[in-house]
Amino acid sequence: MPFYRSFQVNEPPKPAAPQKTATPLNTQAVPVQNIVPEQSGNPPESRIQPLNTQQENQVQTPAETQRQLLPENQTQRAPQPAVPENRTPAVPQPVTPETPAPAVPQPVTPENRTPEMTQSAAPENRTPAGTPDLPPSNNGTPLQPQTPEAPEPVTPRYPANMSTAAFGGLRVSVGNIRDNLPITGASIQISETNGDTTTLIDEISTASTGQTDVIELPAPPLAYSEESGSPRPYSEYNLTIRADGFEPVQIVGTEVLPDVVALQNVQMLPMLQPEPQTAETFVIPDHTLYGIYPPKIVEDEVKEMAGSGEIVLSSVVIPEFIVVHDGTPTNTSAQNYYVRYRDYIKNVASSEIYATWPESTIYANILAIQSFTLNRVYTEWYRNRGYNFTITSSTAYDHKWIPERNIFDTINTAVDNIFNNFLSRPNVRQPILTQYCDGKRVTCPGLMSQWGSKYLGDDGYDAIQILRNYYGASIYINTTEEISGVPSSFPGEALTEGSRGEAVRQMQEQLNAIADVYYVVPNIAADGIFGPRTAEAVRAFQRQFDLTPNGIVDFTTWYKISEIYVAITRIAEYTK
């Protein structure tokens, strides 16, 4: 995976993350206890004491660091509407506007499955003090949470006997933040904290690609992520990353879901002192479907811009970076971060939906996230109101973005496939501000329900059918070819063996630059002829970056090559 750290605006390259702590290192070598499911009735004997995660220089207020847990009991599914036969989830393709049907299907309301809720702590449990004046809403009030019922006993996250537990994958990618080069031989200790005891589970290391192999780790049953009101559907692990010549990094709360692969990217700073006594630590808060977060303040889906004197873009452009304000709009102590657009979408989707959901549901929610984000970009919503950022990380105003959190393979693939898509209505130039809520703890008539979209995916709805169920028949998937930060746009058709021309030559030159960093990619002649050696170089690149290794440069592979090439050459220019 590419090694992009979101970095703070107008600060040195290494950001001081809002959830950063200084953690004393345990310099004592700790033996590794491997996971052996057949013999897992006995817990690992090798233990380390919990690392000190007391935060210093907190940006968030105490109220923002409270935690609450979601319901522990599971409810019965409500009946769903009839679904046409033979409809299977599919990757959405851009479609042309349709004339609204005389009868628009009514939104499905699985929201009547009222969960029973337990109380606990949540990283963000706040309603801004005094309603800020941005952004204006239809009624000026947030959506109202439903009243929780009495708590029930907490169910274990996964069975004590690991041989009966579900498993999820984890792969860690480690790179040098200064030059974007992969770090070989980095050590990653994986541990789990229960109460006052931290148990070392395994220790793995990176290969020459800067990546580890995928390791299987215990996770809760898949059913927990399929029904609202279940116990926590993911396991949380602590990662301590060390490499010679680099400052250690610790990530507390990497999420592992069953049957999917968690992708954790880590960027390390070259060591400034011989023996650092602390590790840079990032504490990952609860997933938004599990923790308690402020409900969305509903806005108009199309912003009135005519005659306002405000600056808007002339067309929809996919930005290379967006600036994320890690707090509410009026929180002047919150930090701003430059984040690559695709990385931002992957982070938000991994924070707001479960990667185990049906493929069509994942695509529908990603399209809604992208359209909302591009509306903020297109209308310059916050900048036109005197702010110096593109979007916030507050769920009351925008989406939840979490510094340094892991993403998941299913979401990673989906975003790479459709990152230049958004949602439109006929005769409306700006992307639609597609808002949503979870549909269980918070209801939002007229907007998409996240849990409702999951049940529709279960019933065979494809992405556009899910979206039209909530936003109406006039909504359609649009595409922009204007993508910032790439040498050139996709040539329009896939490049395969036998292809010739300037697009092939450009792709070969970019692969050669990448091969100088990622040695698994062979160097090739940049002659504009797509032959067997070029196809093998493409397959090696695709294997390195989690793409289907078919040797074909399609839309996804073209832009992934461009993304990695730009990152490598830009860092090289900065370090000259």
Image: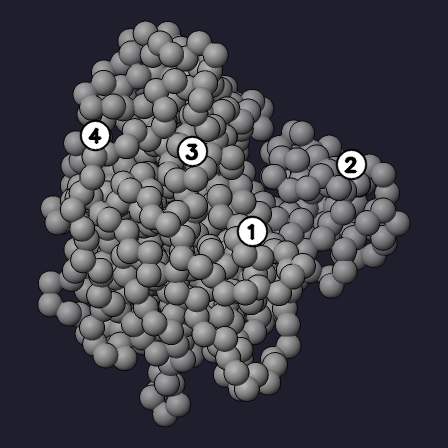
* Image location (x, y in percent) of residue 269: 38, 32
Q: Which residue is mark 4?
A: 53
Q: Which residue is mark 2?
A: 536
Which mark is first along the chain, 4 or 1?
4
Amino acid type of the residue tagged 2 in the rendering: Glu
Which mark is first along the chain, 4 or 3?
4
Q: Which of labels 3 and 4 is toward the front?
A: 3
Mark 3: few/some/many CA within 10 Å (<14, 14-19, 20+): many
Disc 2 from disc 4: Cα separation: 46 Å
Q: Which residue is mark 1?
A: 359
Disc 2 from disc 1: Cα separation: 29 Å
Q: Quadrant of residue 162?
A: top left
Q: Residue furthest bottom?
A: 307
Q: Secondary structure at mark 2?
A: helix
Q: Residue furthest right?
A: 498
Amino acid type of the residue tagged 3 in the rendering: Pro
Disc 1 from disc 3: Cα separation: 19 Å
* Image location (x, y in percent) of residue 181: 52, 33
Tell me what residue is drawn at x 20 percent, y 24 percent.
Answer: 195
Q: Which residue is mark 3?
A: 221
Q: Which of labels 2 and 1 is toward the front?
A: 1
Q: Which of labels 3 and 2 is toward the front?
A: 3
Q: Quadrant of the N terminus?
A: top right
Q: Is residue 75 left or right of residue 503?
A: left
Tell me what residue is drawn at x 57 percent, y 83 percent.
Answer: 101
